Amino acid sequence: MTKICQTLVCILLLTGCLAACNRTPAPTDTPIPPPTPTSWPRPRLDTPEYGMHTFLWWSPDAIVEQDVKLVAEAGFGWIKQNVGWRDVEKYADLAPEHWDWALADRAVTVARQYDLDILFRVDHQPLWAGDWNNGPPQNLADFGRFCSVMAGRYRGKVRAYQVWNEPNLAREWAGRRPDPVEYVALLQTCYVAIKAADPGAIVVSAGLAPTATDDKGAMPDDKFLREMYEAGARPYFDVLGLHAPGYKAPPELSPDEAAASDEYGRQRAFCFRHVEDMRAIMEQYGDGDKQVAIVEFGWTSDPREASSYHWHAVTEEQKADYLVRAFRYARENWSPWVGLMSVVYLPDIVWTPDHEQYWWAIIERPEPCQVQPRPAYKALKEMEK
């Protein structure tokens, strides 16, 4: 079984590399609705709902089944899965046979078999729509068309869509200075397209990265959110997406305490409860009726002293304890405005201890098809929900 999985992994990775070649620009003659506010319904989530971030896309069938089953067996109700636009619409030719939905279909099918809801995170434009770096397409109508086709295909099957990831970081914005106005235009286009195709779908804004850095490489998430509201974002998302890494702090530590302590980095953003700062901004802009989705949160156990993440590493046992306490804190203090909370990660099969993401994960894979739960997975499975 292990040799079969390893062979499949190599084949899938090679296929992905071959697909990453330049394409000619795609036509944009398929109309999408104009990006204007409407009275589309805004579904509500329980407070909280429980999710795990998965990496099913290039994984062999056996691992897809394995990981979705792990989520279900832990008593969680959601998987979060990245969907690369470039992986679906590889070619400039827009004939139906050139839309490759096979891997997205597989994720949806397996999730539904285990009665799990699914959040698709949508980003990574095709090469013909931009460049290799993740960033906004040259023509937003192309993205709107993609969002419309996707939401129509999965109407009633995919419960929520997250529009992009960490646009307040240059590395997720084509290497350019983050631009909230540009992001709102992208969000607006996708929101209208999704809602027109599936009015019941939940549209989540991009998870913003907590950071205090304000330069050409990053913009603080609170500043970015304020400028999103100033740019008119309010009608164009149902739920605000946030990232909430705990850094070094236990989950109950307040932003005031984090900002006052060298141990915790002296920044309000360097704690799980920074979510409360972001919630306050929503209320300042009259958006308090909406919920928040914490689309990524967790703690790293990175032991590598050369790693930039090592300063806030915790032990595997602390990670387990903090994750359980984070859910408890949210349930007791953030009801009813917190919705989905998605833990990182069930890891990608290609990650090794040299990848920083590996140390955020809640399981290990000694071999591609073997699972060794870390204390965090066991604690999350056993906790009250």
Image (cartoon, rainbow, N blue to C red):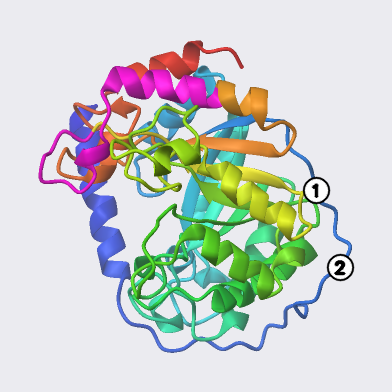
Considering the image in quadrants, where does the N terminus appear?
top left
Q: Position of residue 314 (x, y in %)?
A: 27, 28
Write down the residue under mark 1: 289
- Distance in Å between CA atoms under marks 1 and 2: 17 Å
Question: Image quarter for residue 37?
Answer: bottom right
Horizontal side, residue 98 vs residue 181: left or right: left
Q: Which amino acid does label 1 sit on?
A: Asp
Q: Magenta residues, as a range?
A: 302-327
| Residue 232 visible in image | yes
Residue 154 seen by the camera: no
Q: Which residue is drawn at 28% across and 43% down?
A: 357
Q: What kind of element bears circle 2?
A: loop
Rendered position, 300 above or below 92? above
Residue at image point 44% right, 77% down: 91
Q: Are marks 1 and 2 in contact (CB under 8 Å)?
A: no
Percent x, y for residue 300?
30, 35
Secondary element type, mark 1: loop
Q: Mark 1, residues whose alpha carbon is within 10 Å: few (<14), some, or many (≥20)?
A: few
Asked if residue 312 lies in the magenta stretch, the reply is: yes
**Picture quarter containing residue 271?**
top left
Rendering coords of residue 138 (x, y %): 49, 86
> Which circle marks residue 38 in the picture?
2
Q: Which amino acid does label 2 sit on?
A: Thr
- Whether 73 is drawn above or below 348: the answer is above
